[in-house]
Image (cartoon, coloured by chain):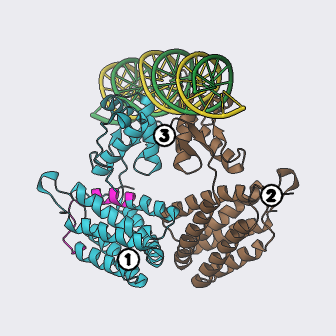
Chain colours: A cyan, B brown, C yellow, D green
Amino acid sequence: MLAPMTRTAHTPASSGKQMLSEKVYSHLRDAIMRGSYAPGDALKPQDLAKEQGVSLAVVREALVRVVGEGLADRLPNRGFAVPAFSDRRWQEIAEARLTVEPVVLRMSVERGDVDWEARVRAAHHRLARTPAYVPEEGEYYSGAWSEAHRAFHRTLLEGCGNPVLLETCDRMWTASELARRWSAHRVPDRDAACEHRRLEEAALARDADTAAEVLARHLTQTAAALTGSTPHQPAGKA
Amino acid sequence: MLAPMTRTAHTPASSGKQMLSEKVYSHLRDAIMRGSYAPGDALKPQDLAKEQGVSLAVVREALVRVVGEGLADRLPNRGFAVPAFSDRRWQEIAEARLTVEPVVLRMSVERGDVDWEARVRAAHHRLARTPAYVPEEGEYYSGAWSEAHRAFHRTLLEGCGNPVLLETCDRMWTASELARRWSAHRVPDRDAACEHRRLEEAALARDADTAAEVLARHLTQTAAALTGSTPHQPAGKA
DNA sequence: ATCCAGCGAATAATCGATTATTAGTGTTAT
DNA sequence: ATAACACTAATAATCGATTATTCGCTGGAT
């Protein structure tokens, strides 16, 4: 599957045909996930409308959708804003993932078919061959690596065959990524590549217990790395 | 000296303070959950706007939120509609709950404090004392019982102390209730009250394993009762 | 009789403008 | 000098109307 990030809406079929609110929505979502706004920043409908060349209603609809996904906060009569995740919030998200994902992975390993195996191999290959950092793309993970990383973890879980569970995991992943983006700019080096390789091996060997345990450790270490390394500003506010 | 009245003397917080979209949203949500619309029914913005006495934009915003919660489908350029859950969809939801809720319940039982224990007792008491059916409220569970039922299960899980997990469970519960409403009008009598009592007992006895297992059976039986019994369309009824 | 093109009503999507609420600023009374 | 009040500017929320798309229908050709 191709990444929806690099979307070139240029063909006549997609440019004039798609609903405006959809385009504005995905643009807004990408911008927030990309870190274009600082946490707490106000998302002003008027500015966005002018930027995108659309009316307020369209922007408003997109904003409501974004709020529904937890990628923005809505303050009644005070507009929309990028959420400012507290340290506590981040821990809750990490714990939720740690609670759910290993269980789903276990299901996935037990149920995945040959096509799933093939997709896992492909996703891991792509992840392993994608450089995590590129100098010109800022100090954070490269966009390509982030997408490959997401795709790998997503693919691992897809064997479970349950869209409801997958959507739940997607939602948590999104929240996790957003929180991570603003928790620390660089994760202290750990051998993530090795962990991913071990995940792939356990999954393809149909060793559900090992896979679940490796994933749990993977998530635990990610959480520890972020909560351990204090961000730039230890927030003292609620 | 406290006379901050300028010229718009509005009554204290009761009259027109809440956002319209919020009111329309909750009304719409309740109507769908209550079963006021049949699955597949179109949700026409114009009709709703006239009914509620508001403009299209407000209705539209509410509809987008409802779609975000999975309580309505959006068909591009074809408007909004009440989702028609397939049997498969219902099974997926049931399985997702079965996968996640027992794990969360285990956490809850292990972590819940005394306040949580008290709330569990209270919620169970209310559930046990609320009649499941009332003649004048149609053929389905009474509104009061549905709410008490939801509150009991919710309270059981609340001990986990993780809002992210709780929101995940809420979402699944909502989807489950909606699907159930249209899967069968009456669940063949089983001793749900007994199951609830056993859940309460295990939870308060801090027996996490038993509680999780009882919940798993509870969910399995609910699922079985619905998929086993005839769906809402008795096509070959002669 | 059946199938496809073209017309027309219904309605989804969008827009531009209006009203209501909030936050900031300056003023005045203590 | 400070604190409360009044005023103003910004913008959130809502509305009424306009444009674009889909669906159903009629009519003609095969």
Q: Are marks 3 and 1 on the same chain?
A: yes
Q: Which residue is mark 2?
A: B236
Q: Are marks 3 and 2 on the same chain?
A: no
Indicate left or right for A194 with A45 as reference: left
Label pair 1/2, CB-CB below 8 angstroms: no
Q: Residues within 10 Å of mark 2 (few under 14, many from 20)?
A: few
Q: Earlier in the sequence, mark 3 or mark 1?
A: 3
Q: Nearer the viewer, mark 1 or mark 2?
A: 2
Which chain is disc 2 placed on?
A: B
> Can you say whether A166 is above or below B67 in the image?
below
Whole-angstrom CA distance, mark 1 to mark 2, is 50 Å
Q: Secondary structure at mark 1?
A: helix
Which chain is disc 3 placed on?
A: A
Indicate left or right for A113 with B187 as reference: left
Q: Which residue is mark 3?
A: A76
Residue A176: say if magenta.
yes
Q: Nearer the viewer, mark 3 or mark 1?
A: 1
The residue stretch that appears in magenta: A174-192
